[in-house]
Image (cartoon, helix red, strand yellow):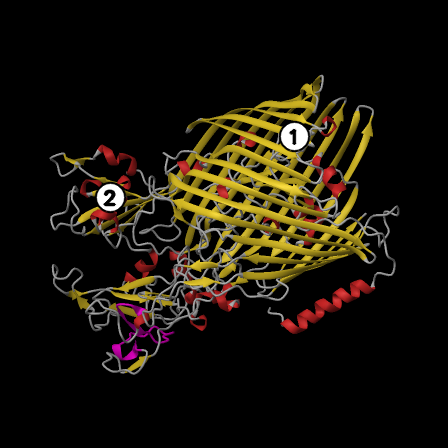
Amino acid sequence: MKISGTGWRASVATMALGLSLAQTNQVKAQDAKGEEAETESIAPEAEEEYSTIVVTGSNISGVKQVGSETVVLDREQVLATGKSTVAEVLRTLPQVQNASANSFTSTVSGGNSQGGSNVTRGNSVNLRGVGQGATLTLVNGHRITPTGTATAFSEANQVPIAAIERIEVIADSASAIYGSDAIAGVINYVLRKDFEGIELGGSYTFGDYGNDEWTLSGVVGTHWSTSFGDGNIIATFEYLRREPYLRGRNQRLRADQRPFRGNDDRVNGNVATAGLAGNIYIPTADGLTNPNFPQGGANTYYVLPDNPTGNILTIDDLQEVQLSGCMGAATPSCASYPSLVDRSDFEDFQGSLRRKQATILFHQDIGEIEFYDEFFWTRSEQFTRTFASGNQATNPTVQVQPGSPYYLDLPNATRSPFPPFVPSFPQPLDVQFNLLARMPDGAPRFGNQNPDESFNNTFGARAPVFANWRAEAYYTFGKNKTCGVCYLGNYITLERTNLAGISAASALQQLIDLPVDDPLHLNPFSTAPFTEEQLDYILGTNSQYAQNWSHDFVAKLDGKLFELPAGDVRAAFGGEYYYGIQKLQNAANRPPDPGPVTTPDANARTTREQYAAFGEVYLPLVSQDMNVPLVQELTLSAALRYDHYSDFGSTTNQKISATWDVTEDFSLRGSWGTSFRAPGLPELNAGVFSVGLGSNIMPGPGITGFSTQPNGSMNVLFIFGNNPNLKPEEGTNWQIGGNFTPSSVPGLRLSATYYNLHYKNKLGTAGVPAPIFAPGPFASPELLAQYSAYVIPVNNTPDGMGGCMVDPAIEEFTGFLYGANLGANPRDFCNLNAVVDGRTISAANTFQDGIDASINYYTDTSIGTLSFNVSVNKILTNEERTVENAPMISALDTIGDPISWRGRGSVSFQNGPFSATLFGNYIGSYLNDQPITLRETGEQLPQARVPSWTTFDLNLSYTLPRGTERWSFSDGIRFSVTVSNLFDNDPPIVLSTLTGGSSSIDLIAHNAFGRSVQVSLTKSF
């Protein structure tokens, strides 16, 4: 559904006018908070209140944050965004950036798979754009159980918005406080704890592309007093339903991007999304691009006719593809284009979603001991439709063998597979086959199911122990079960090798190869649907289930050490024990078995134990009543933490912070700290995911030091996937900043922070070129020298019986999980000449520095309260390297990398129960340095600047707080309308090899959701 711009804007204006006129009584204006606030709310009195309750970033209770700036979004600010999930709310912050392979979002860059390795279609938050693993996610200050299959990450949507009291974000290192993951910063969801009554709510969001969603929520809470102490309980439940977003509804996401000067991605060389009838393609005799159809590369295409009765075809029934004319064609008539469909008409950009979430928070005092229990649970079911079965983005290609009654002796069908060494003979015909078009009515729909269920429960107690010291201990148990590659009963394998890496016919190909009189035989040129018997033979399952468990026990003390003239010196000490488990099971129907035969190929279990000890001190050196010139207050804090891991050793991290209030108007702050991230459990286990690709290549001139095959070629094993030799990622972060709240301009607050982050041993790949269809690192001595650390010569010892003693240097590479024969059997280790290690490694480095700045201002006027806010993030430098000892190179303001300028601002008006806020969102310009090449002409588009993108959001709300009449219809109501991308401003056109051919939107930096409208209503009793 696409809404017309003019009529839509008129509707919004009418709605705003109506709400304004509904105000018959002016109520005293309430203090307005900046819509993108930080620890400081705009109102000074609110700032003081927050300073006593913020717990993120410290183990010491009752102290102010020292050194680091905290971004706080309170409940009203969260609701004003009009977002349905906390992950979407967080992505409105300028400090949150997506970067290629560094971020997880639930949308897919292609309908069949997701960028990076986020096959579960989860959501993570990426502070600074340095990687989703560098951001720690907490709920009420407690760790959560990770999710993921072949990789591990923290799901951002842990709790429903209905349960949120506020969200706190510290974009600073915090491993000295919390341990692993807090390199770029910490996100803490603070849940509602004290609520009396009932709250019912609902929202409906409709978008431009049919991706409507609605939520229903309920909150109930009560408290009590007994002879032994007070207590309370609050429970929240939320249900969210989202309709699928079909790619084809957005012209910018269609495979055919020629209207936007892009390519027609429906056909690229010998890969195409064939229509109902399909096509035959045959390599050109000279191996050069076909001038009559350049998009087909070095192939000649022949269009097959509609053939519902399955007739035996002749060459005269075909049409050779020529863009113009039919000169020299092998067929009587020609087609100007192959038989194609646009797969975007059949696949989802964002799948359907059904999610249920619940939280229960319980608190009970027994004497001086406070007991609490915090439980939150999520179950979601996603279904993302795909065009082809499984992870394939295009049709399968089946073959018609010489001697088959369907075989056609087309030009160059008889040729040498390896000229000039092998003579010519008839080769199989390659037929592009549309599976989806042949599925009968009632057959399972191709698509990836992503069921996911998780819960976390924390039980703890706090109590005074002596003097001014308090103790706290808690135990958190969590479990997650998810499915990544999850095609259940709707999978047709297109693989051509078995698990041993040996060529094998798929079940689909087996049906074609059966004798014609066999009841299961499949005519590859027929357009009739599969029979039930054929479908039963080829349909199967491909599943990748993972379970993650975590046990986390923390005990700590905090209190007063002694007193200084400026105040109490306070400290915290404690320890932590963590035990984690990840299990992964993968199974699929593999060649040569029929579809219903499921073959297990992974059954991995990984465990980890962790011990930690930590300490922290809060040191007030100067207070206001000491009358020190230019020092109103000076406070230091220091933290130290030691962690020992059972799988990779120990690490110690520290942090020092200071806040200096120069005057009542001006303060300075700064911090320095180290941090780390432990590799996720699956990332260390090759049994979870590892692939060996066998290829035969001809080394370039000057390549020496390797054994070769008799003809001078080399059999090379290229291995990628998880690596048991990973080290912890490490970070060093320092910041300095200041706040200015001039008393001469009440309501104004200026804030700026310079940050400097060094991130080393970052997980990534070496970037070594894969020697699959080209020599890769063996192309030249220069390339070989650059990647020498990842190239291993193989020197096996013959055993005299036709086998060998495998070279010990490659033993760690022989246990890969999956193999593919791309010219050489990857498991034939005796015939290997070299191994190229493309596994994940701990060698990447990132350096980033930049500035966070904000301006907040509010003022009371005769008509209401006006407030203004601008928050920006300016990255000054972002440099990276992927190979150890390689030079650092700039990775800023180029496609796929962080963008130097991002900002969000707001203008708000509030008069009694009515408020209106206009948000502005800015994403800066950057360079597309990886442009596409146009296949029709061979022209490579020039590098070009992608213009900045500015959008606006509007929120209108009307809130009446609960009064004394609990069951009054009008009291306790909040009604709001939020319009995202108010003026429906389309993102810039970007045609890049990085974003794929089936999109003219940079889905890393921008989004494809267009305009959406959310209407929400909440009633409290």
Which residue is nearer to you in this view: 904 or 550?
904
Separation (CA) of disc 1 from disc 2: 54 Å
Q: Is residue 222 left or right of residue 835?
A: right
The mark total stands at: 2
Q: In this view, does 494 lie to the left or right of 40?
A: left
Residue at 22% over, 69% down: 284
Residue 131 higher or lower than 519, as above or below? above
Give the quadrant of the N terminus: bottom right
Residue furthest out toward the front: 629
Residue 70 in sight: no
The percent position of residue 339, horizontal first and vertical second, equals: 37, 73
Dividing the picture into quarters, in which one does residue 72 lie? top right
Residue interval drawn in magenta? 296-322
Q: Do the residues labelled 1 and 2 touch (CB within 8 Å)?
A: no
Q: Nearer the viewer, mark 1 or mark 2?
A: 1
Q: Which amino acid does label 2 sit on?
A: Ala
Give the labeled residue for mark 2.
785
Q: What residue type is labelled 1?
A: Leu
The percent position of residue 108, horizontal first and vertical second, equals: 48, 56
Give the labeled residue for mark 1.
634
Which residue is nearer to you in this view: 460 or 478?
460
Residue 230 in sight: yes
Residue 597 lies in the magenta stretch: no
